[in-house]
Structure formats: structure tokens, C-alpha cells
Amino acid sequence: GMIVNCWGYNGQTPGPTIEAMEGDRVRILVTNKLAEHTSIHWHGVLLPNGMDGVGGLTQRQIKPGETYVYEFTLRQHGTQMYHPHADEMVQMAMGMEGFFVIHPKEPEQPRIDRDFCIFLQEWFVEPGTSTPNPNIMTDFNLFTFNSRVFPGTAPLIVRLGDRVRIRIANLSMDSHPIHLHGYNFKITGTDGGRIPASGQWPETTVNVPPGTTRDVEFVASVPGDWVLHCHKNHHVMNAMSHTVPNMIGVKQSGVDRKVQNLLPDYMAMGESGMSEMAAMNMPLPRNTLPMMTGKGPFGPLEMGGMFTVLKVREGITCYDDPGWYQHPEGTVAWRVAE
């Protein structure tokens, strides 16, 4: 595992999901326990200007130890976010962000059975260290769902026939094309609100640009273990993949033996590709994740980063992790030749 020293809200990153209903009047108290000032911007929420949370423009900065009150009436519904508007480069890079979910006043039809929130985040943590570097703008080495990389990401457990919504938020520097295996879904909402039924469209991949949210919905009609992941290939790898030299096609006969005279644990990697790294056990710097990790029922998964599994099961009585899918006989790809 890997532990990173982050900043957050109520001791966590992403911060707790704030849920309220359209028409509610909300009051949120914010106490600053940082060593520097901060503020909170309610990203996408329609509210009075003085509650917008832009330090120095719409309010005074919240100094260390101070408590401020934000109070406003919710005039919309949809998936929104919150984050600082003070020293953003540092505070957001350290993990200060969260969901603000506003439910519609009128009951939704059709009814949603399972409602998931996934925050997309990017970090740079130097191998062997434990604090994100906020000065890195492009060369991130950890890509997370809710501040976790696979296999530490939470699986999405649903019952066969459930209507599922996945809310995806992105305050990172990159866009992320999020792809679901085995299903198409409808894009039903953005940070601008719910899309009318006549305007919803089917996809298997939804691109989530920086500063936006997307809601997707589908009926879980096919049982199995289905992957949900970012389709930028290096976003499903972990930290070590960003520092390994390219050795594809390089003949490495004798390299191990010569280098091991200086570094006993050295392994040359990647002569024919990178998949071999999933099975290697070369020692890593402390508090660092391997490039590819995780094991499935058929062997190493060779994944990391923005990757999780939608587990669709028939007849389950609770939403605890049911383990790996048991395929019916004759439904798994088989080998016909070496």
C-alpha cells in the first residue's frame, strides 16, 4: 500500500459529499485548520454573489482558526462540486475538493437504485516520499478514483436489474474519457443540470473535461465483472511507470548480471513490452506503488490508477463485495493452440 499526506475536508479527500434538496436553505460552517488562509467556492451552484467563496473578491479570506458561515437557498438540482478559491494550485493539488449533490424536488422517474460518486484526481508524489508536489502541472504519476488507485478503488456492487447512476467529477488538469465495459449508458446530466430525455444520448465512453461533472445512467442487465476505467492508457498505471526508461526492443542479455554487481536487486524490464512487470517483485522505494498491480481470478490484471470493477450479480441480498464472478460453463474464452 501507499499512504499520502493530503489536505481535505473533515479529515478526508475527497471531502464528504454534501447532499440537499432543491429548494432547501442550507447553512454550512467552515473552520480553517490549515496553516494558511482558505475559502470555499460552491462550483456550479447558483447562489448570491457574496456566498460564491472567491477569497479577496466576494469575501475575506478565512484565516487559520477562523470559522465562516455560508448560507443560501438551492435554486437548482444536479451534480456540483466544492473546492477552495484561495491558493488553488496548492490546496486543490493537496486534495481539497468534494461533491455537492442537489436532489430534485420532484421524485425522479425512473427511480435510481444505485447512485455512485467518483471524483477524478491527479497527483505527483515523488517515489519514496509521502507528500504531493503541487508545483507539478503536467507530469502527474498517480491518477485516482476518489483518491484511490486500483486495486484500492472501491468496486461498484449492483444487483441484476438495478437502475444505476454514476456521477463523475473532474477538477484535475486533464480531461478523462471514462469507459464502461459491457454496457452502453445514457449521459443524463452535466454540471449545468439534468439533460431532458429528448437530449440524452447513448455512449460507452464519456469524456469529462476539467471543471465539469457528468452523470451517466443504465440498467444493469448483464451479470459479470465489468471494468470502468479512464481510457488514457497511462492513467491506468501507477507511479513507477512514469520513471522507467523505455527498453522495448533492446536486447538485455547480460544486463542484469552486470548491473547486479552494483545493485543486487536490479531487474532489467520491458524488453518485449511492460506486461512482465506485473509478475516481478523488484524492491521499490518505500511508500511507492508498482506500475501495475492487482490480481483477478485468472492472474495478474496489469492495471492501476483510474480503474475499478462494476460487479453485477443476480439474487444478491446486500451490496457487500460478492467476490469474483463465477462464469457459467462454456462462456469463457479458451485456448486452442500454444
Image (spheres, rainbow, N blue to C red):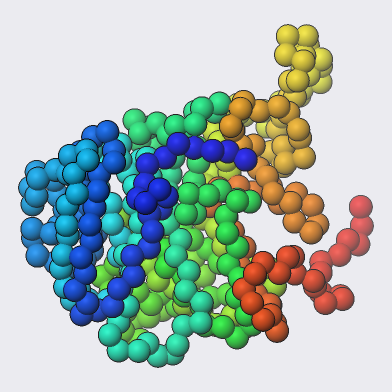
Q: Residue at x 34, y 30 (%)?
A: 135
Indicate the position of residue 157 as horizontal and vertical percent values.
61, 71
Quarter containing the N terminus: top right
Q: How many marks?
A: 0
Say which of 120 and 52 sits in front: 52
Say which of 95 and 189 sits in front: 95
**Is residue 216 left or right of 3 when viewed as pictured?**
left
Q: Residue at x 81, y 66 (%)?
A: 333
Indicate the position of residue 83 as horizontal and vertical percent values.
28, 52
**Is residue 78 left or right of 266 when viewed as pictured?**
left
Q: Residue at x 73, y 20 (%)?
A: 266
Say which of 203 and 153 sits in front: 153
Quadrant housing residue 196? bottom left
Above or below: residue 90 compared with residue 166: above
Indicate the position of residue 85 as horizontal and vertical percent values.
20, 47
Does residue 311 appear in this view? yes
Above or below: residue 144 compared with residue 330: above
Q: Residue at x 37, y 80 (%)?
A: 200
Indicate the position of residue 49 as horizontal and vertical percent values.
8, 60
Above or below: residue 276 compared with residue 58: above
**Is residue 265 left or right of 109 when viewed as pictured?**
right
Does residue 276 appear in this view? no
Of all residues, the one furthest to the top in this rendering is 262
